[in-house]
Amino acid sequence: MKTEHDYIVVGGGSGGCAMAGRLSEDSTLDVCLLEAGGDGTGNLINIPSGAVAMLPTKINNWAFETTPQPGLNGRKGYQPRGKALGGSSAINAMVYIRGTASDYDRWANEEGCAGWSYKDVLPYFKLSECNERIRDAYHGNSGPLNVADLRSDNPFQQIYLEAGRQAGFKMTKDFNGADQEGVGIYQVTQKNGERWSAARAYLFPNLHRKNLTVHTKAMVQRVLFEGKRAVGVEVLINGQLTVLKARKEIILTAGAIQTPQLLMVSGVGDSSELARHDIDVVHHLPGVGKNLQDHPDFIFGYSTKSLDTLGLSIRGGIRLLREIFRYRKHRRGALTSNFAEGGAFLKTSPELKDPNVQLHFVVAMVDDHARKMHLGHGFSCHVCLLRPRSRGSLTLQGNTMDTPPLIDIGFLKDPRDLDELVEGFKLTRKIMHAPALAKWIVKDKFTENVHTDDEIRDVLRNRVDTVYHPTGTCKMGTDDMAVVDPQLRVHGLEGLRIVDASAMPSLIGGNTNGPVMMMAEKAVDMIRGVSRVAALEQAEQNDKAREEQLAQALVPLPV
């Protein structure tokens, strides 16, 4: 086994796969990727509907829980995190969303992250993306991450859109273009009806490279330091404790939960927190584990008799057999569903610049992250608050990586979050009760007797939980609580960088998978000291010129 590399990437999720794939494009660099889970292959991962078996279980999933939450009436929350090559992109609902321009301008202009404005990050979204349908200034069409329209052919997509129209909301065919607001159908990270995880996008096509080493079942125990410089990692590979050295950098990409945990057990964090667990302090960095943010989310659920929704019934089982055959032959139909097929970004107040709530319309009954099943068929709709004011934290309950950290998600700690979510609840119910959808409802499972604002607050506190977007625990910035600088280098240390959702200074308005890969694309250019943006812009200009030439050539000559 090779024990020394130029770059060691810790965590094979969205950021890690993108970093390893892109860095290893340079044949002069020796790159090693370490992933604690499995190889990220198999039907459960590749078939989109397999998510229903992974999300509520420990299959390819760390399946963390939070501490009891005062804002949720003392309930513990759930925090599923991917445990395989591809990370959470191997188990998620594959929704491709970037957030708004204002999100990134806030990072740059208000949160000390120079170089991360929307103008700065858009080229890296485009470098990452290969959009099958949309060709315009906001999208890429040749990147490794395939973005496609759904192939489920579910008629409830159109029913949902019609309900949105009846409720008075505008429609959109692109949540990632000039204007995010509206009701539409999500594009997904799929290709030919299969999940297109970060591993399939960035890693698997490049495993033949001699300068790329990938270890699975490799649980990093500690980052090793010489003084203030990170020089290696202590890692358990297939049960054997090994030390791997990094000549240039160690790049942490273990996500918003495990990246701060790894820093702390390695001696980097708030010195008082480390002292409680008898961890020798390498570097006092009080922001590690602080600033935890996530989208608080409520789910409406309705039973229906329609077999076009997914559910548990004899007739549904017979139909599923037909859908399996259809998938095997055509890669279309119910098995290609990401479940959360319909979307919306809405404003709870007209004076808001950007939408502040997001909807995920699900063609199945969802209760407690699919951990509670209901007989029969149904549909659901999530509503989440996009920019919550509440903050949580992540602390240790042991001094090794073997003990899960204490995750205090902080949901609804700030009463303004609850007030906003009440308004988001009302907007969502307006769509659900519009005639197009209302006629399909047999029973309102969770909100039938909820009418007043106080009743809405009660049901929110009883049922809100994550929509799987933890961020911010090693935030980028220049203030005293920042963990990394705008180059994603850990403050006060050398040879250590963080490229995952933990480095986001604040939540973006949407799903976080695509933005993490954007961050990795940008980080690669930072490390190399060479920007690919100019080459991208030149290629776009060349494409435009060719299109103009073709258009001129096709102009009919005068008779």
Image (cartoon, rainbow, N blue to C red):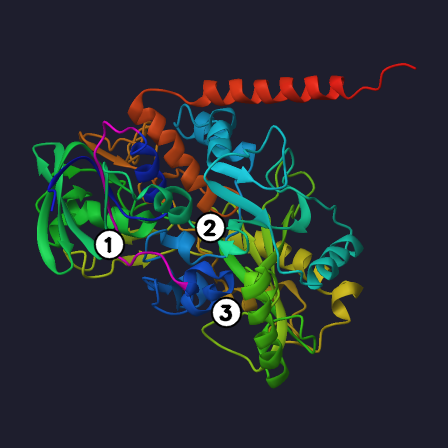
- Which tag, 2 or 1, sits closer to the chain's start? 2
Residue 237 vertical position relative to residue 246 in the rendered view, above or below = below
Residue 196 is tagged as 2
Q: Residue 100 appears in which quarter of the rendering?
A: top right
As measured in the structure, the alpha-carbon distance from the residue carrying label 2 to the one carrying label 1 is 19 Å
Task: Mark 3: give few (<14), some (14-19) or many (20+) Cα within 10 Å.
Answer: some
**Which secondary structure, mark 2?**
loop
Q: Nearer the viewer, mark 3 or mark 1?
A: 1
Q: Residue at x 51, y 32 (%)?
A: 126
Residue 303 vertical position relative to residue 288 in the rendered view, above or below = below
Q: Nearer the viewer, residue 228 or 19?
A: 19
Whether residue 57 sits left or right of residue 465 in the image: it is left
**Horizontal and vertical percent for residue 78?**
39, 64
Q: Mark 1 — residue?
A: 216
Q: Is residue 445 visible?
A: no
Q: Quadrant of the image for the C terminus?
A: top right
- Which tag, 3 or 2, sits closer to the chain's start? 2
Whether residue 104 sits left or right of residue 240 in the image: it is right
Callout 3, which amino acid? Asn
**Which secondary structure, mark 1?**
loop
Q: Residue at x 59, y 70 (%)?
A: 323
**Which secondary structure, mark 3?**
helix
**Horizontal and vertical percent for residue 365?**
58, 71
Q: Is residue 73 magenta?
A: no
As measured in the structure, the alpha-carbon distance from the residue carrying label 3 to the one carrying label 2 is 35 Å
Q: Mark 3 — residue?
A: 462
Query: What's drawn in magenta, residue-wise?
Result: 26-42
- Which tag, 3 or 1, sits closer to the chain's start? 1
